[in-house]
Amino acid sequence: MEQQKLFDKKMMTLAIVATVGFGFLQGARLLDLNSGPYNPGPFALAGLAFDGCTFLAVALLSYFVRIENTGKLFWAGIGVAVAYALLIASGNQSDIALFLMQAASGMGWSLMILCWMQVFTSYRPFHSLLMIALGYFIDTLIQPISSALFPGSRQIVLLIVFAASAAMLFYCLANNESVAQRMKETVAPKTSMAEAFSRTRRAVAGTLVFSAVCGFIIQMDIFADLQYAQTDLTAWIAIGVALAMCAILAVLKLKKANIDYICPIAALCLASILLYRSFDAGDNFLAGAMMTTFLMSFYVLLWLTFISEAYERKLPAFFLLGLALGVARLSIAGGRLLAQVLYEPLALELHTVLIVSIWILVVTVSLIFASYLRYSSKQKEHRLDDAPDELADPAAAQADATEAALGLLRETYNLSDREVEIIREFSAGRSARYIADYFVLSEHTVKTHLRRTYAKLGIHSRQELLDLIEEMEARLLR
C-alpha cells in the first residue's frame, strides 16, 4: 500500500526517465574513445586529474555548505561538455587542443555524474539502488546495439545519447524537489555521525588502493599494446554483471547498502581477475575486458553504497560521492603514472606486477578489517564506561550522550533553543535545505543561525562542531 502511495504515474515516469538517462550518460562515456581511465592518449592522465579534482572540489564546497544548488552544477557541466564537443568537431590535434579536450571531458563528466547522484539521493535506497543497477544495465547495452545498428557512426551515436541524457537530467532536476518531499522520512539515522565518518574513511582507503592497482595494470597493458576498453566483449561481460546485480537487488530488496561491504566484495573480485591473469589462462583481451568490467562495476558499487549513506544522513550526494569518486579517479591516474615511472628502470614484467598486486590487496583488506575491529573495540569500551545498561540499544546510548553534550553546550556558550535545535540536526548530518524544510524556515535563516552559533562556539566547520560535541561528551564522562 505504501509503495502505491509513493509511486503514482508521474513518480513512475520520473523514475524511468532517471534510470534511462543515467544509463545513457554512462553509455556515452563508454562510447567516447577520447577519454576515460583506459585512454592511451598522451594527455589521458590530465583528464583523470581534472576529473578527480572536480569531484573533490565540489565535495569540499558541499561539506562547508558553500554549494547546494544543483542547477549551477548542471549548467556548468553542459557548458564544459559543449566545449568538449566543439574541440572534437574542430579536428585540431595540437598538444594544447588535446590537453583542453581531456580537461573538458573530465570536468564535464564529473559534474553531470554528481547531478545524477543528487537525483538518486532523493529516492529511498529501496528504489534508488535498483534504479542505478538498471541504469548500469542500459549503459552496457549501448555499445553492442550501436555497433550492430550504426556501424561507423560512433561519434553521432555518442552525441545523440549524451544530448538525450542531458535533457532527461534537466527534467529530473526540475521535478526533484517533489520527489524528495514524497520520499522524505522523519526517522533519525541509525548510526552516529562519528561511525558514519569512520566507515567512510575505510571505504575511501579501500577505493584508493583498488583504483591505484587498476590504474597500474591498465598502464602496463597499454605498454603491451593491449587496448581492451570500449569493445563489444567488454560490453557483453558487463551486461552479465549488470543483470546479476539487478537480480540480487530485486531478490534481497535492500533498504540500505552497507559501505563496509564494498571493500571485501571489491577485493575478492579484483583478486580473482588478477589471479586468472597470473596463470596466463586464456586470451589477453578477455582478461583486459574483465578488468574494464571490474572498474565500471566498482564505480556502481560506490554509487550504491554512498547513495544509501547520503540518503540516511540527508547529506548532499555531492559530498560523499564527490569524495569517493575523486579519490578513485586520482588513484587511477596515480597508478598509471607510477607504472610509467617504474616500467623501464625496473624492467617490470606483467606476471610479477599481478602477484604483487594480489599481495597489496590482501594487506589492504587486512588493515581495513583491523581498523574496523579497533574502532568497534573503542566504541564498545566507550559505551561500557558510559552506560552499561544501554548496550542492547547503542543508538539510544549515543543519542542520549549527544543530547547531554548539547545541553552542556547550551549552558556553556549561552545558546538559544533554536540554535541548539539547528546544530542538533546539522551535527547529525542534515543539510541546511533539509533543516529549513523540517523547521519551516527559509534556508537563509538556517544559515544565519549556523553562522551566529559558529561565532559563539568559536568554530568554522561541521567537523569542528562534531569535535566540540565529542569534547563535551568526554567532559561529562569525566
Image (cartoon, rainbow, N blue to C red):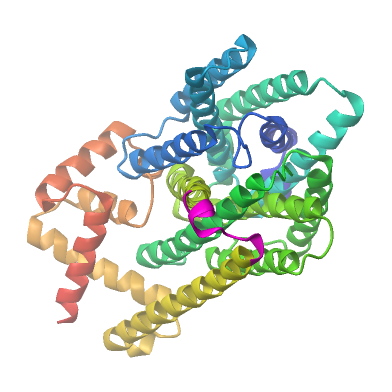
Q: Nearer the viewer, residue 253 or 275?
A: 275
Residue 49: where, in percent of width, then height? 45, 38
Residue 243 placement, left or right of 60: right
Q: Is residue 145 above or below residue 453?
A: above
What is the magenta range?
Answer: 341-351
Residue 267's spot in the image, x, y percent? 61, 67
Q: From where the camera sits, is residue 104 visible?
A: yes
Q: Is residue 54 above or below residue 419?
A: above
Give the position of the C terminus as an image quadrant.
bottom left
- For residue 324, side relative to residue 358 (left or right): left
| Residue appearing at x 65%, y 45% in the figure | 222
Residue 393 image-quadrant placement: bottom left
Residue 55 in the image: above or below residue 384: above
Residue, far top: 90
Q: Main secondary structure of the magenta part?
A: helix
Q: Position of residue 244 (x, y in %)?
A: 80, 58
- Residue extending furthest toward the right: 148
Q: Nearer the viewer, residue 103 or 455?
A: 103
Q: Tell me: 315 left or right of 415.
A: right
Residue 442 visible in the current orientation: no
Image location of residue 443, percent across then percent down: 33, 34
Query: Residue 145 colored magenta?
Result: no
For the residue pair 146 and 322, the one nearer the viewer reads as: 146
Q: Nearer the viewer, residue 263 or 50?
A: 50
- State whether residue 13 is above or below residue 317: above
